[in-house]
Image (cartoon, rainbow, N blue to C red):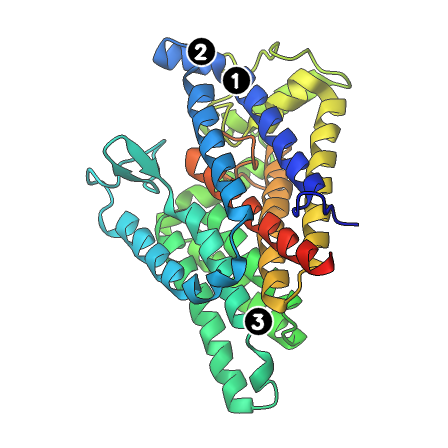
Amino acid sequence: MLSVRSGMDLTFFFLVLVLVAFGLVMVFSASYANSSYRYGTPYHFVINQAIYAVIGMVIMVLLSYFDYHHLHRLALPIYIITALLLGITVVFKGSALVRPTNGAYRWITIGSFQFQPSEIAKFALILLLAHLLSNRDADLHDKSAKRFRALIYVAAIGVICALVVAEKHMSATIILLLLAAIMLFVGGLPKKWFIIGGIVVVGALLIVANLPYYAHVSTRMEVWKNPWNPQLSSNDAWQTQQSLYAIGSGRLLGLGLGKSRQKYLYLPEPQNDFIFAIVCEELGFIGAVLIIVLFALLVWRGVMIALRAKDRFGMLLGIGLIMQVGLQVVLNIAVVTNTIPNTGVSLPFFSAGGTSLVMLLAQMGLILSISRTSNIEKS
């Protein structure tokens, strides 16, 4: 049963709080050596993350009171604005507006404020597809209308993915495509679309990955096959090797919170995409399983909220938002354990990053809005 005392799903809200708090503890633990070395203080990364967490939590609570139906008319404007922001990162690459961060040009910088449009793109695509798919029943029996709608779906997915590909952000592209596939499937599109679309997408990704512009992808594939290959550059395989060392060192119970060895400038940027390796090293197999269980409960609860939404739009929006979390968790853990090639996917609520955390918490607020509206209807 959904919680009804406060009008929102309290279990979902509590799970988000626990994950955010757990994430802050691990950001501090993973980052303090790197932070001390680079900034002269162990608190640089955790303070930034805590500030964004507070901002995100406030936005989450406010959005839980927001009627998500208003997003229907905002879907296209938000998508267009996001596409323009992505275009800025491509057109103004290397300028004062789009400066490199760890060698990537994916952030827009305005004064001391910096944000990543590709994080917003995930929400923009989810919202637009929820809007389009919730209105498709009217033309189910009109072949010309169905063809036209198919073109709209392709355009909506293609434009945003093309702009993210131009950023050299393959991981975000993969997440966007997987999210789109899930939403189209839940939206009831014919299976033949997925067969044809899957062939086209896989072919396109293989072509893009073999372009000189994406030369780093083939290198990551070689690292994935054998990170200990002596023919590989030590720089190419270093991060994966150190991640595996960290995971192996943790064993069952871990070395203890704060006692990681690999975070002492061995594992690069341990507070970012590879923070799960530090979790495994410090908290062991038990700690890793605990985090996976918390995420599984969050996704399960989110799916239940979506399925109990009072309308099709709420259901599709909720599924898309919570599946983004699930996909990123699976892909991140797969990368950290070298199950799949390194794609640069962050771990929700744990990896340091302001835009990602604020957007995630805002999206959790919309799921709470769906639960609140649904609960009001049921009560």
Q: In the figure, residue 107 lies in which quadrant?
A: top left
**How far apart are labels 2 and 3 at the CA level?**
48 Å
Farthest residue toward the right? Answer: 1
| Closer to the eye: label 2 or 3 | 3
Circle 2 sits on which residue? Answer: 42
Residue at 60% across, 21% down: 278
Farthest residue toward the left? Answer: 95
Judge left or right: residue 52 versus residue 337.
left
Q: In the figure, residue 199 lies in which quadrant?
A: bottom right
Circle 1 sits on which residue? Answer: 28
**How far apart are labels 3 and 1 at the CA level?**
42 Å
Q: Are marks 3 and 1 in contact (CB under 8 Å)?
A: no
Q: Is residue 363 visible?
A: no
Q: Nearer the viewer, residue 105 or 107?
A: 107
Residue at 30% across, 34% down: 113
Which amino acid lies under the numbered mark 2 shown in the image of this protein? Pro
Q: Which label sits on residue 134? A: 3
Which amino acid lies under the numbered mark 3 shown in the image of this protein? Ser
Q: Nearer the viewer, residue 9 or 185?
A: 9
